[in-house]
Each structure stands twice: as structure tokens, then as C-alpha cells.
Amino acid sequence: MTNRIAALSVPVLVAAGLAVPVAPAGAAATAATAGAAAPAGAAASSEDRFQKVTLNDFPGEPISLAVLPDLRVLHTSRTGQVRIHDPRTGLNTIAADIPVYLHDEEGLQGVAIDPDFARNRWVYLYYSPPGDTPSDDPDTPDVNEGDAPEFGTEADWKRYRGVLRLSRFTLTGSTLDLRSEQRILDVPTDRGTCCHVGGQIDFDRAGNLYLSTGDDTNPLASDGYTPIDERPGRNPAYDAQRTSGNTNDLRGKLLRIRVGPDGRYTVPKGNLFAPGTPKTRPEIYAMGLRNPFRFAVDRRTGAVYLGDYSPDAARPSPQRGPVGHGRWMVIDKPANYGWPYCATPDLPYVDHDFATGRSGAPFDCRRPVNDSPRNTGLRHLPPVTAPQVAYTSALSAQFPQLGEGGVGPMGGPAYEYDRRSTSRVRWPASYDGVPLFYEWTRDYLREFRLDRRGEVRDIRPVAPSVVTDNPMDLEFGPDGALYVLEYGDGYFAENPDAQLSRIDFVRGNHTPVPKISADVLGGHAPLRVAFSSAGTVDPDGDRLRYEWDFDSDGRVDSTEQHPTFTYRRNGVYQPTLKVTDRTGRSAAANLPLVVGPRAPSVQFVTPDAEQPFEFGQTVAFEVAVVDDMPVDCSRVKVTYILGHDGHGHPLSSTTGCTGAIRTFLDDGHAGLDNMAAVFVAEYTDEPSGGLPAQTGSALVALYPPPSTPAAVWRAGR
């Protein structure tokens, strides 16, 4: 498990239209807290009757979620863990740990449940199987074998070819049975280089499965414009024409298939290319997408609400093309959305020769042509279809309600109001059929009100007083509440403010807000721990019932407010406090507790966050690790991430306690605000004393002058 004891989140309760941050109790290094508090007696206002309830404060590096019919919640971490939240007990446990390849952005991505889950118990995952892809050798500190070469030959690049895999597994109780895997579909990837491998999974009413795939293309050598580098000695991963613009490739697409009982799939009628069409893949429903990281299918209408991530160009160029645009579209029929040739039908990119540095004519968005030597599909592509929303980092004249800042569009679900439901947390009928939109970099939720043609006629805030920190995934549960997975501020790690939460519509009483703390969170057995519920409140002033589970077995061990417990055996525990009010509303908070060998402590000796820095420098690093066992420097992993507006591109990783990394910055990001060279060090020790391997991590961010963005980042925006 990741050691995050010393950096817990500051949770927020929303009540009476107020967002009230609550500081952790106790300043001692051995103290820890989880949960939130709000003024007792606060009542929901008529303007905002939403409340955020935290379900898991320790979700790993959160990526995707799926709500089960019994209201348990599956949520994935990119590092391979599938967690399951049980609202009955408040416990958050590991349902599976999938072995995954983790270079760049790859790992465990999407999760979804089968439409007939109550009968077949199938859970779908989209992940990167390890394979035999080269990895860094710690004995060669001057060479990183895990990074694919930027220039070379087919033999060089072939070694880095891998797949992202769509499979399904059976959930038995709270365990995902890895032996039950049915492999459904493999999507090719070019590994060892950045970026864009996002994959969301969803179903329509007919049972068809939709999968979104990124363009798997490195955007960091294209000045922020379209990556169409056709040079023969160039790594193919720098040319998106081989993927998004290729009718014979599954990347940069929205796929639609029908999976049978044996895991094999067929292609439903009505996709972009009929089965048997030469040089096409019949699985493609929509193409010309860059990184369609999040979408949702409206099961009543069949429409797909999809967000597609923006390129990084900060300004338009007559020689290269438009400024970076994020896009949101209503996909109700097969279409080509233009990438890498056009942002919209009226915003073409310019054909650019990377060998000579010269630009030609703008691409024809009505009749796009793919002339890349790496194109294995049709030369003449379908015309470019317009998105319903396109916006940049500046304030939009057409959609000013979107604000300004980073560009990270996420397509959210449409609410289905059930008039027969008796759920006390269901959202009101006024949201029925309204698709949600969320902005990862701008930390908000919006509702898109559509006209009969599917065009956006109004954009409104959704529960504006509810704080969401880099919302990563949204899904309405069977109870009509909105479940939210938040990434938090930071890069490729379990961030202090990452969490799984539920946003309720308040009818009558609020849900109580638990708070848990302990005097110690580590040591060898026998270990006596004094727990406290100090700070726990009920916003309506109700008397609360306290239920403690100290050993994570699902049984109540104490009903005291401030109990003590002695752990007789070493192990990893999750002491949990569940509180219930007079109406039966309940919530839980928990803490990670390791009894036995401690998790390793990791620190950067160098670099230092205050040292002078310019991009392009080779930065030397030294990592200090303190552990109960001998430290093996070959198990230290240091990753360099190009940070921008709260998101990042992992560009390189190496192993060892010492070394050096060149801080590459592409021309497309050069000169932008809020740029940082982020270094993340991780150390995972050997299993010991009956405990699983434990991980410690550290992060340092370097900023070029002017240094003002550093303060913004460190404050967590």
C-alpha cells in the first residue's frame, strides 16, 4: 500500500450552500485524521441542497469507477489495483491487483460492469499487460532502456510494440477472479514514449459495448500543433496519421462492439465502415479523436456524450494551424471528427514537413486525405463533423460559462430520473435527461442543456458549492446519487486530496460526517492504539450511533466514541468508523494502519525545490530511502513529468538512488504559464513479516523563472 499517513487530505463538507474546509486534528507526527466536519444544525438552502459524502480517502492513483447494483463501488488505480467500497461496512478493500505495464501513461484504465451484472457478475477492465517490453537497467545509469528511441529503424521500434487489452472478469463476493479472464479485444500501442492511451468503457440499451481509445502519439515535438512527423527514421509514435487518421487502426477512436457469452465479439450494424470494407476496421464507430478520455452513453437516446482533449498550442499560427481546442460532442451516428487534420470543419491544421521545417497548404476538412507512409487504411477519409462545443484556454465568446484556464474536457453521464425510486439521495427530476460535463483542469461540473437538435443552448453550474478537485470520473448510481472519483492536485501518484465520493441531493436530513484519528499509525505487535472520533458531527444535530471495525473483518468491535484496541499480530489494517443518525443515514471514515515493519520513507536529497532551474538542464538527483530492511537502490524508480496546469506528461523514468535526467521541453509548451519539471521518486520494499510489499514516494517540482506559479502549485490551486 502507498504510505500517505503524513499527507492526508483536507476534506470538505457541503451544507447550507457552504464549503467548509476542516484541518486535520493533531499536530504530532504520530497523529492522523480522516473525514470532515461542518457546523452542527446547518440546513440545506433552497439554492443548493447538495452534500458531498467521502467514501474513500485513499483510492491509489484514481482512474475510473463503476457502481454496482447493491451500491458497492469499484474504482481503479493506474498501478493495477481494483478497489471496492462497501457502503454497508464503510470498508475499502482490494478486489484485485492486476499486473500492468506502467511506463508513461499506461497501466489500468477503464472499468465497467455488464448490463446483466446481477446474473453474470462480469466486470470489464481495459489495461496494459506487462509483456516483454524493455525496461530500465539500473546497472547502466547513463542509458534508459525503458525509453523507446526517437530515431532508429523498424527493428528498434518493434521491441516496444505492445497492447492495451479489453477483458472481463467475474466478481465473486468482493474479489475479482483473475483466473476467469476472458480476453475480448487488443488495441496496439507503441510503448516507451508518451502519450494518450485513455480508455473508457460503457454500454448502450441494446447491450453494445463502447470503448474510447487515445491516439497513442507523442505530441511533445510538434510545437503544440498536429503531430504528423513522416520522416522515415522517426519513431512512428510521432505521427497521429497512423492511428487517429487511419481507418485500419483502432487508436484515436470510439469503438462499438457486441460481446458474446464466450468473450468473442461481433460488430453491430451502423458503424462507420461496413464489415468487409477493405483497409478499414468495422469496430470503429467514430474516428479522428485525440484522447477521448471520458464519455458516457445516454441509454434512453443512444447518444454518446464525449470529451476530447486539446493540443497544447497557446496561439494560432498561419504556418501550423489553430490554437489548442478542447471538444465535446454528441455522437448519435458514425462520424470523423478530424484529428490530426482539423480541430473543427472550419479550423484545419496546416500540412507541415518536419524534415524541411516548411509548411504547405491547410488540410481540406471536407475531403481529408491521409498520405502518411504509415497509413494502412483508406487514403480518402470521411468529411469532418463539427463538435457541439469547442473551446480554448481563453474565455469563449460562444460559451463564456466554461470560464478560462487549462483545457481538459470530460464527457459525463446524463441523469435518468426514476419517479418510482424512494432513494433519499436521488437527484431531482429537473436534471432528468441532462448530460453533465466536467473540466479536469478547472475543477468544476457543468450541465449542458440541449435543444431538440442536440445543440447546447445553455450551460449551468452543477452544485457549485461542492468542491471537486480534478474530477476524474462520474457515474450516477442506482440510488440516483452522483459518484465522483477525484484525482487531486499532483502527478501519477495517490495525491493527498484524491478521493472517491458521492454527491447527494438532500431531502430532510443530511448524512452525518465522521472523523477518525489515532495516536499512532505504526509499530510492531502487540500495538495499542487509542482511536478518537473527535470532530464527528451531524449537520442536523442528531444523536449518532458509533460503530468501530478495527481489524477490517466487517464486524463491529466497539460502539464507544473514543475506544482503544490492541493489535496482537502484524498486518495491514483499515480501522473504520461508521456513524449513523436517527434516520438511518450513515457514513464511514477509515485510516491505513500498518502493524509490523513500516513503509519505507523516501526523500529527495537533490534536486531541491528552491534551486535555480531552466528547462533543458540535465538535473542530477539523489534519493534517500529509510526502511526496516536493507535498501536496494535498484528498486528506486524516478520519473520525470512535464507538468502543466495541474496535469502532466511522463517523459522518462529511470532507476537507482542517484542519476540524472534531461528536462526536455517541447516548443509547444515553451513560454506557457504554470510549467514545471516534476520528479517523482518511488521505492517498493520486499514483502516481510507476513506483510505485502510497501511503497514510499516523494515529489519535487522545479519551476523556471518567474517563480510565481510554484506558489500556486504548492498551495494545491
Image (cartoon, rainbow, N blue to C red):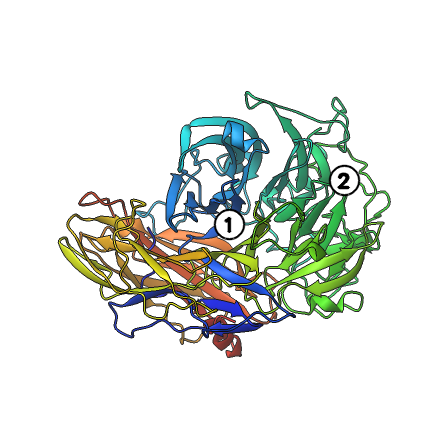
Lower position in the chain sequence, tag 2 or tag 1: 1
Residue at the extreme left of the image, as rendered: 526
Picture quadrant where residue 607 is located: bottom left
Residue 674: x %, y % from top left:
56, 70
561 up-or-down from 478: above or below:
below
What kind of residue is marked 1? Ile
Q: Secondary structure at mark 2?
A: loop
Label 2: how many Cα within 10 Å (few below 14, some 14–19, many 20+): many
Q: Nearer the viewer, residue 594 or 649?
A: 594
590 up-or-down from 77: above or below:
below
Answer whether residue 55 is visible to the viewer in this image: no
Residue 26: x %, y % from top left:
29, 73
Q: Is residue 531 left or right of residue 329?
A: left
Answer whether residue 20 is visible to the viewer in this image: yes
What kind of residue is marked 2? Asn
Q: Nearer the viewer, mark 2 or mark 1?
A: 1
Residue at the spot of label 2 = 370
Q: Secondary structure at mark 1?
A: strand
Res. 63 mark: 1
Residue 595: x %, y % from top left:
20, 53
Q: Is residue 485 left or right of residue 363?
A: left
Res. 429 mark: none
Tally of marks: 2
Q: Is residue 689 left or right of residue 22?
A: left
Query: What residue sits 50% from the left and 57% below the top?
Result: 487
Residue 618: x %, y % from top left:
43, 63
Q: Nearer the viewer, residue 671 or 88?
A: 88
Label 1: how many Cα within 10 Å (few below 14, some 14–19, many 20+): many
Question: What whole-number distance in Å separates the C-alpha atoms at marks 2 and 1?
Answer: 33 Å
